Each structure stands twice: as C-alpha cells, then as structure tokens.
Image (spheres, helix red, strand yellow):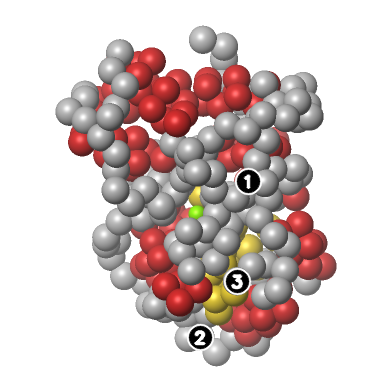
Amino acid sequence: MSTYILWDIDGTLVCNTPNGGALYLDAIEQVTGTRPTERVSDPHGMTEGQLLAAILEVNGLDGSRLEEVLYQLDVLSREQHERGHVRDACVGVEAAIDAMTNRGWTNALLTGNGPHRARYKLLAAGIDPELFDWDHSYFGHQSPTRHHLTAGARAALDGHDSVIIGDTPNDGLAAHSAGIPFVAVATGIYPADVLETTSALVVVDDMESGLDDVLDAIESATSPGRDDEHPEVSEPQGEAGQLIDGPRERPEVAPGDELLHESQGRVEHPPAP
Ligand SMILES: [Mg+2]
C-alpha cells in the first residue's frame, strides 16, 4: 500500500494571480469570435471544463464548442510558456514536497487543470514537474465538477491511502464526497477560518509554518496509524473546481522543456495552431 499526496495546483502549489482567467477569455474569443463580458461569480474550486462551460453559458455562447475551447486553451498555454511566463510558488511547498517524499509518500496532482496546463504552471513557478507521479495524478479539465474528479481518483487508488491538499472549500467538499482525507492550506483566496468549516484534518496558513501539523495529520490519517475515521463516500453534490491564471513575464523558463506522453509520466505538447 502506498500513500499518495494529491496536490491541488492553483492557490496550493502555485499562487493565484489577480488577472486570472484572461487566457480563458482569449481561448473562448478565438474559438467563438466573441469575447465574454459576463464573469462567473465564484470560479475558485471549479474544474477547468466546468468553468469554461459556465463562462460560455452566462455569455450566451455555444456550449458545444467546449472541446475546441479546451484545445485552444492548451495552445495558448504553450505559447505563454514559450514566452517565459512566470508564476510564484506558494510558501513552503518545495520543502513540503521533499518532506512528503522523505516519509515514503508519493506526491501527485489532483487539479481542475488539464495535464498540459498543470505542467506549464508548475514550470512557471519553478517547481519541478518530475517531483510528481504523473501516472497517479488526476486532471479535471473534462470533469463536470470536482466531485467527479475526486471520485475517479478514489477508484483509481483503491487499496492505497490518499490525502488531498487544497485551498478552497470546494476542494474539501469534493474530497469528502469521495471519502478522501483533506488538508487545507490558506494560501489561496480563502482564509483559514473559512477553511475551518470544511472537513479538513488540519488547516494551516501556509506549508512552511504549518508543515509539521500537516505531516502529523497525514501520518495519523493513513496506515498503519489511522483509526478509520475517514469521511464516508457520498454522492457528488454542489460545485467544485479550480483556477486562475495570468501573465507576468520573465524569460527564464526553458522553452525547450518538451512535454512527453502521459505514459512516460509527462504529457504531449499540443500541436501548433
Ligand atoms: Mg485551488
């Protein structure tokens, strides 16, 4: 039995950006010919597919174009990466990832992003994508909600322990619905007192000041020390998901960092438009 630490990306590993979502608008405009003007009120915790579908809907655009928009989003993300796009890593995550590895746990991803976007975001924040097990990572870009994402991860990791680390109440709801223990970190837009209302084993301000508490909580929630107090599996409910993105340029990210196939633990570059 292995223990998988399933990291959310936006607000958990990589800091959110104030102009987040601009790339979504660009992708939708390039596909539909219309730039959305109506915003989705609470995008945090939505999967990418969920959020894009919502943007199309509130703007009266054709929802059947979603697959094309997702494809275009990958193309734009690759172009942004090649321009040297830079993000900030959340406080303490590199040391936290190392600490998880040193405990014998496997770091992986559970994110509303697609695999291309996930990889570009990690690279932009200076986080080595190879620190994560891509064969046991779960991507929600085509999940209608985050609950579908966590349910799939739970089934795939049957027989293993897993813990989700995330920054939104929706992360907690989706973890709970799949019966996966949840650790909350307040490095996204939600303060700790809001995250305290979730089923989180522990809520920390960041992964630096709270690392010991996080490690202790995961240790006690996973074999052999756990007491089987994991939340019960329940039907998907409510909203969930992810995101935020936005440009800040710095010409340091190696454009030649090719993305290989998922079976090799990596993902393919989307082809040029
Ligand atoms: Mg997040």
Amino acid type assigned to the residue bearing label 2 in the image:
Asp
Alpha carbon of mark 1 to alpha carbon of mark 2: how far? 26 Å
Q: Residue furthest left?
A: 60
Q: Earlier in the sequence, mark 1 or mark 2?
A: 1
Secondary element type, mark 1: helix
146 displayed left or right of 102: left
Label annotation for residue 160: none
Amino acid type assigned to the residue bearing label 1 in the image:
Asp
Quarter of image, res 83: top right
Q: Nearer the viewer, mark 3 or mark 2?
A: 3
Residue at the spot 35% in from the left edge and 19% down from the top edge: 29
**Tally of marks:** 3
Q: Which residue is mark 3?
A: 205
Is residue 266 visible from the viewing direction of this image? no
Q: Residue furthest top?
A: 273
Amino acid type assigned to the residue bearing label 3 in the image:
Asp
Label annotation for residue 135: 1
Depth check, front residue: 29 or 66: 29
